[in-house]
Image: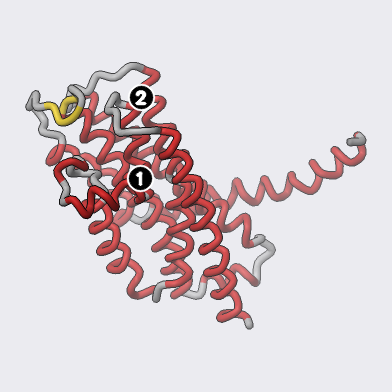
């Protein structure tokens, strides 16, 4: 590639990078000014961990891993998916109802930058939540993990949550804006308990034991459990299935977006 071509590419990308940076700042500021999202997003993981982590108990659940360690991975999985579906999916549905998508079409901001900024903001929100949960588990729950295990746990959840970003985007463009929150609430709650996240797979009914391993919810939790020392099967299978779900959900997201675009703008 010639020097002139490289320079031309950098010249075109620079304004996009600046727009993305400013849009991410705007999205972060919007979340910061929304206590109804910010407070539950940080407090709910701590409450769930306190309830499910068996604080102060030495009971083990699986392969010698203590309850408070097992719960850290489970609650982390539950809450990071919640962040993706609520801060990304419900946000898009609400903005559709407010016709923000129409307003954005009147600005120079490309739709790709607008959506990428939302994705980056959702990941940043998830990172803050995971750091707060990890700190709480360490200080209050007494969870002792190696530095590698802490990093692996957080990185696995952040990378493995990609299919749920696409799912949130698809839901946000399909459901009625006024019904987005209850629909996601109900489906998310049922899936969480049916996927063996809060109840070990062996304790679920036989039919759920057969279905749960095909759930992306369970497979993301599998990555988290493996990071803290719980052996739940092949990690390669988990990664492969999460990648497959990513492709499926991204295709659904694109179709949903194009359908909404045709409906809004003809």
In the image, residue 89 above or below residue 25: below
| Residue at which label 2 appears | 150
Residue density around tag 2, few if under 14, some if 14–19, many if 20 or more, within 10 Å: some
- At 29% from the left and 49% from the top, the residue drawn is 212
Question: Looking at the picture, how far across and down is residue 51, in whole percent?
Answer: 12, 41
Question: Looking at the picture, how far across and down is residue 128, in whole percent?
Answer: 38, 38
Question: Looking at the picture, how far across and down is residue 129, in whole percent?
Answer: 34, 40
Assign the N terminus to one quadrant of the image.
Answer: top right
- At 35% from the left and 27% from the top, the residue drawn is 227
Q: Secondary structure at mark 2?
A: helix
Left/right placement of residue 247 relative to residue 111 reads left
Q: Nearer the viewer, residue 155 or 98?
A: 155
- At 36% from the left and 43% from the top, the residue drawn is 219
- Say whether residue 113 is visible: yes
Q: Secondary structure at mark 1?
A: helix
Residue density around tag 1, few if under 14, some if 14–19, many if 20 or more, within 10 Å: many
- At 56% from the left and 75% from the top, the residue drawn is 259
Left/right placement of residue 227 relative to residue 257 reads left
| Residue at which label 1 appears | 80
Given contact means CB atoms under 8 Å apart, are the residues at marks 1 and 2 in contact?
A: no
Q: Quadrant of residue 123?
A: top left
The residue at the far top in this view is: 146
Q: Quadrant of residue 186?
A: bottom left
Colour pattern of the rendering: secondary structure
Question: Looking at the picture, how far across and down is residue 166, in whole percent?
Answer: 49, 56
Left/right placement of residue 263 relative to residue 239 reads right
Quick one: label 1 or label 2, which is nearer the N terminus? Answer: 1
């Amino acid at each position: 590639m010639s020097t002139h071509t490289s320079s031309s590419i950098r010249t075109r990308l620079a304004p996009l990078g600046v727009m993305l940076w400013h849009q991410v700042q705007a999205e972060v500021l919007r979340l910061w000014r929304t206590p109804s999202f910010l407070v539950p997003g940080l407090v709910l993981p701590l409450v769930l961990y306190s309830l499910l982590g068996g604080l102060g108990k030495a009971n083990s659940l699986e392969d010698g891993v203590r309850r408070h360690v097992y719960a850290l991975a489970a609650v982390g999985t539950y809450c990071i998916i919640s962040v993706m579906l609520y801060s990304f999916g419900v946000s898009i549905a609400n903005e559709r109802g407010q016709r923000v998508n129409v307003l954005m079409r009147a600005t120079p901001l490309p739709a790709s930058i607008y959506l990428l900024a939302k994705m980056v903001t959702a990941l940043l929100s998830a990172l803050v939540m995971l750091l707060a949960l990890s700190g709480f588990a360490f200080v209050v729950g007494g969870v002792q993990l190696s530095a590698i295990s802490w990093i692996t746990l957080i990185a696995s959840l952040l990378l493995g949550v990609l299919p749920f970003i696409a799912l949130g985007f698809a839901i946000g463009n399909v459901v009625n804006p006024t019904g987005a929150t209850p629909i996601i609430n109900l489906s998310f709650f049922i899936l969480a308990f049916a996927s063996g996240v809060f109840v070990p797979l062996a304790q679920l009914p036989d039919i759920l034991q057969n279905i749960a391993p095909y759930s992306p919810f369970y497979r993301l939790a599998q990555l988290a459990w493996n990071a803290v020392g719980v052996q739940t099967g092949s990690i390669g299978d988990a990664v492969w299935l999460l990648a497959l779900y990513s492709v499926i959900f991204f295709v659904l997201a694109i179709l949903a977006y194009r359908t909404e675009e045709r409906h809004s703008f003809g």
